Amino acid sequence: MSTTVFSNDLPHPAPRSSRPEIMAAEIIERLTYRIGKDVQVAKPHDWLTATILVVRDRIIDRWMESTRQAYRTGQKRVYYLSLEFLIGRLMRDAVSNLNLMSEIRDALTSLGVDINVIAGLEPDAALGNGGLGRLAACFMESMATVEVPAYGYGIRYIHGLFRQQMADGWQVELPETWLAHGNPWEFERRESSYEIGYGGSVETVGGYDDAPRYVWKPAERVIAMAYDTPVVGWRGKRVNTLRLWSAQPIDPILLDAFNAGDHIGALRESNKAEALTRVLYPADANPAGQELRLRQEYFFSSASLQDILRRHLQQYPDFTNLHDKVSIQLNDTHPAISIGELMRLLVDVHGMEFEEAWEITRHTFSYTNHTLLPEALESWPVPLFERLLPRHMQLVYAINAKILLEARKEKNFGDSQIRSISLIDESGDRRVRMGNLAFIGSHSVNGVSALHTELMKETVFADLHTLYPTRINNKTNGITPRRWLMQCNPGLTSLIREAIGDKFMDDTDALVELDKFADDKAFQEKFAAVKRANKVALSNLVGSRMGIRLDPSSMFDIQIKRIHEYKRQLLNIVEAVALYDQIRSHPELDWVPRVKLFAGKAAPSYHNAKLIIKLANDVARVINNDPAVRGLLKVVFVPNYNVTLAETMVPAADLSEQISTAGMEASGTGNMKFALNGALTIGTLDGANVEMQEHVGAENIVIFGMTAEEVSNLRAGEYNPREVIEGSRELSQALAAISSGVFSPDDRNRFTGLMDGIYNTDWFLVAADFDAYAKAQRDVDQIWTDTSSWYSKTIRNTARMGWFSSDRTIRQYATEIWRAI
Ligand SMILES: *Cc1c(COP(=O)(O)O)cnc(C)c1O
């Protein structure tokens, strides 16, 4: 194999020292010569930047070695394409994975700087909406940890997900400015730039003897420029690259126009190009149907594919072995246009035959499906697709013709099956179906939990599954135990190390050794003390940010996730209202003191989700100020949910709410974070909850409500929510109170429509599951009352959640899909 890229034998710099006094001197050096600040006047932000630069140097040596190694060994490279990376803060992650935490702390202490203060200033990189983006971030860390040579590809949004503020209980969206102080983690790669085209026409060249060749002549072009962020694996073994693309104009300024006096017009092209990567679409389960979104998807897909092919040609003479050396994982359908783009590049630019290009393409791509919600399956109007990507439209038709013909001939598909597998939805205005394109253009299509994978086979992809019966497979999601245990919960981590040693830090399956301490009273007390300290920390945050005092001896009952009707925050709020009523009506009973905490953002255009946030706040105000409650119930909505907030809330939870309508949550990963950190789960048999029950044991999780099958039967039959509501006194009183304005005296009809939704259709089955949920909550109270039983269950949760490490998930992807380790 060719080694031209690294053929010269220039010496590499000596590895950087990890001695605190040397790092302290380097921090001063960076502060002075890189940031240009006198030590005397340096601001905390300057200290943070200088510290990151010093940490970054420790990463670079390993980063370059990882890159060299991939060339040397000729190992397959994995490319993870995702429109979202919800990475959060990076410093603690990098420092602790390099095993430098105490050294950096000592270095900073010697300079009179508190690491916690500067670490708290690091912006939370929120380049994603929720679970899908956080999964991509956990996967990046795990790919480095299990030593897969991998690149993440995405978009460097100037404004990540909006910052959420509350105004009188309503969500207000403010722009997130995570780059305001610069980003010392990233490296701008001006040399890695590619042209991305849009619009224009396709010309045919070649005579009648030759097979025709097609040349796309785009009408518009922008430049994609790379920014690289190193991703350090656990113990620094490997460092991979997260490459994010930023849009730049071809002509930064039209000088003729400027000189002619049109100062604004002269910059129009430039502004238009930059607008492409300015904002992350705050959509969650429903797609933003805007043209700009399709432009973003093609922009980062095309840049990534061009980059992948360039890297391949540095090492190999042609693309005949592309699928042996490259695996491209599509995180949902957002990058599915990459399939068309690879075909275009291979056929039009590199002159490969269509059939050969198709075989290589299909063996290179694999696709992860994240949702079955019909409104979330991406599709684009044919006229828009054709106008923006005319050559890709031709290729889509060509692929479709080939596949439909094969299906008719080889599998005897009839008209209705053909309609369902077609890349073009002909049922209304014609649309290009990105889910079908991703499925047909991949050799592997995976779901993200066992249940979700089975439902995929039965619902959205039933006919494609018949056509390609071995393509669908399952890879249950996971979370990185570095961030979601060791970093966010140092107290619990120390306690576990004391009890069972350090093995779990390299292999989370070893957590199971904690099982034998589950009934040990002395261990239970220590476990409880850690939980209490985490609850005190959260109480302090809530106290200082919101002025609400919490009692850390109450049960902390937490539901944090995007606000969505299927996730059923509404079920939780209605139960809080019912409980409030009970506490006031029955002062003679022993109520378990509870704090119900919520956090989460609603998509700005999602009316009901925003109303649910307002309801939580309205209910909180009434309950928290009613002396008849005697402190037995509090409701708190903590603003601006993000990764950083999750890192404080997850370790403080006694009870984890995972109560989606069964069949609607593909996996969930929040559920895993809580259980790993010693919370009891109350949940439906949905997503990965099903497998969590298998792992932690049915006696250590509180499951309630309808199954996915029951939900689907109920919806297909004649469900009458009004009847159900009338049959439940607690439920009917709670709904009536909310509907009639008890919690919104300033606008009595504010929630009438929201409640009518439950009375009339109840699509998300809040009413149908209410009684089972309320009963399950009283079961939780019972367990809480027996402290020893509570901790024995929660310790067993921590002990048995090791399988949900994203290292396990990534090993499965790497061996079963990518064949890369
Ligand atoms: C883990 C996580 C999610 C996903 O939570 P679910 O409960 O699985 O929906 C979303 N947002 C953030 C910030 C997270 O850390």
Image (cartoon, rainbow, N blue to C red):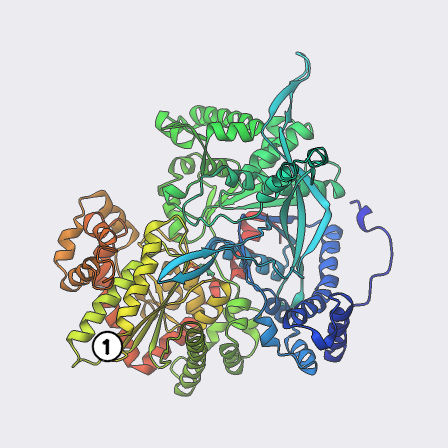
Label 1: how many Cα within 10 Å (few below 14, some 14–19, many 20+): some
- Residue labelled 1 has its Cβ within 8 Å of some atom of ligand 1: no
Work out which quarter of the rendered image holds the N terminus and state it: top right
Q: Nearer the viewer, residue 655 or 451?
A: 655
Task: Give the image location of residue 184, x and y in percent.
Answer: 67, 61
Residue 566 visible: no
The correct choice, above or below, for 154 with respect to 487 in the image is above
Give 499 or 686, whichever is nearer the viewer.
686
Residue behind mark 1? 629
- Most extreme residue toward the bottom, as rendered? 522
Above or below — where is 195 with respect to 94? above
Which of the 4 image quarters holds residue 118? bottom right
Q: Quadrant of ligand 1?
A: bottom left
| Residue 352 left/right relative to 580 | right
For the C terminus, the image quarter is bottom right
In this rendering, the answer to whether 524 lies above or below 308 is below
Residue 471 at x, y = what percent?
A: 48, 41
Left or right, residue 276 beside residue 704 = right
